[in-house]
Image: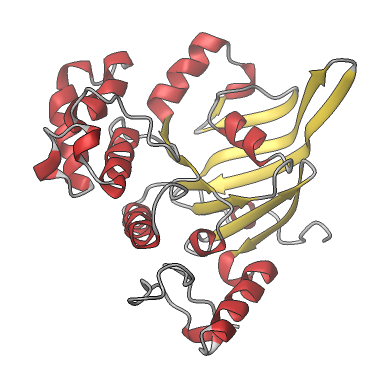
Amino acid sequence: MPRSSRANPSATRPDVTPVIRISDLHKVYKVGDERVHALRGVDLTIGQNEFVAIMGASGSGKSTLMNILGCLDKPTSGRYDLNGRHTHRLGMSRLARVRNEDIGFIFQSFELLSRATALKNVMLPMLYSRQHLFSARRRARQALERVSLTDRMGHRPNQLSGGQRQRVAVARALVNDPALLLADEPTGNLDSATTAEIIELFEKLHEGGQTIVVVTHEEEVAGHAERIVRLRDGQIISDYPSAEDPIHREWVRSVAGAFGRAPGSVEQQAPGPGDASDAPATTAEVKP
């Protein structure tokens, strides 16, 4: 597939403030005597309050890009500005501060402390923050209220369902009011009904003004984003509004055909009794 002529739609909108601006980004790993080019000249702009899905097969550079977006790694060359900060120029201690204050992470495996309550898990990022140390408990309670877990604050992870654990992880990611919510396969360990609940939560956060980037391999999850960015061999090969993405549109048609629906009528829904194993829990409404 050729590189999309629609790359970076938000870059052409002067009314959108960039949260992420990447220019000519390269990442090269040395493996023995070989040099592995994980990213090859990536350009990407994501504006404030955008909801973007990043997709790609294994080896596409998707995970490398996510690590750089999350300031967990630095590029070999190129520029990465996050919320106005030139992160590619920062040392490790400054990057740690950016991770704590500007980025909220959500992981596939939740990454909760098993012996801590939901409230204490959510308080954890603020123990390393200069901004909210003395208001940590109050802010953690407010974050748990945002994800509808007011009655589960005193529960430990083993007393919570998978969906509730992921909601705790979302609350923890939100507690420092990050510029960017970065989710790595957030529904990978969830069943279809719970996936629908988490995606609905992301949509509400987006409606409230949160900038969200989801790294996923699931078309039904990506379809709920505003944009789908696809990588292959370390390069962006397409960047479309989700309703116009050719691969996603074809996926929607195939799902609609399999269940005897018109493509434009494929909407978010949970599978009915007896078809939970083979029907997607969520699909994006797409007008062909």
Q: Position of residue 166 (x, y in %)?
A: 33, 43
* Figure quadrant of the C terminus: bottom right
Residue at the image position 41 percent from the left and 75 percent from the top: 275
* Figure quadrant of the N terminus: bottom right
Q: In the picture provided, is 115 more to the left or to the right than 212?
A: left
Vertical placement of residue 154 versus 193, above or below: above
Vertical placement of residue 236 versus 193, above or below: above
Residue at the image position 85 percent from the left and 15 percent from the top: 32
Q: Position of residue 27 (x, y in %)?
A: 75, 28
- The picture quadrant where one finds residue 258 is bottom right
Q: Nearer the viewer, residue 9 or 125?
A: 125
Q: Nearer the viewer, residue 120 or 192?
A: 192
Q: In the picture provided, is 37 more to the left or to the right than 244?
A: right
Residue at the image position 51 percent from the left and 61 percent from the top: 226
Q: Position of residue 266 (x, y in %)?
A: 48, 80
Q: Position of residue 70 (x, y in %)?
A: 53, 30
Vertical placement of residue 174 versus 224, above or below: above
Residue at the image position 25 percent from the left and 46 percent from the top: 161
Q: Is residue 260 visible?
A: yes
Q: Is residue 12 visible?
A: no
Vertical placement of residue 50 versus 60, above or below: below
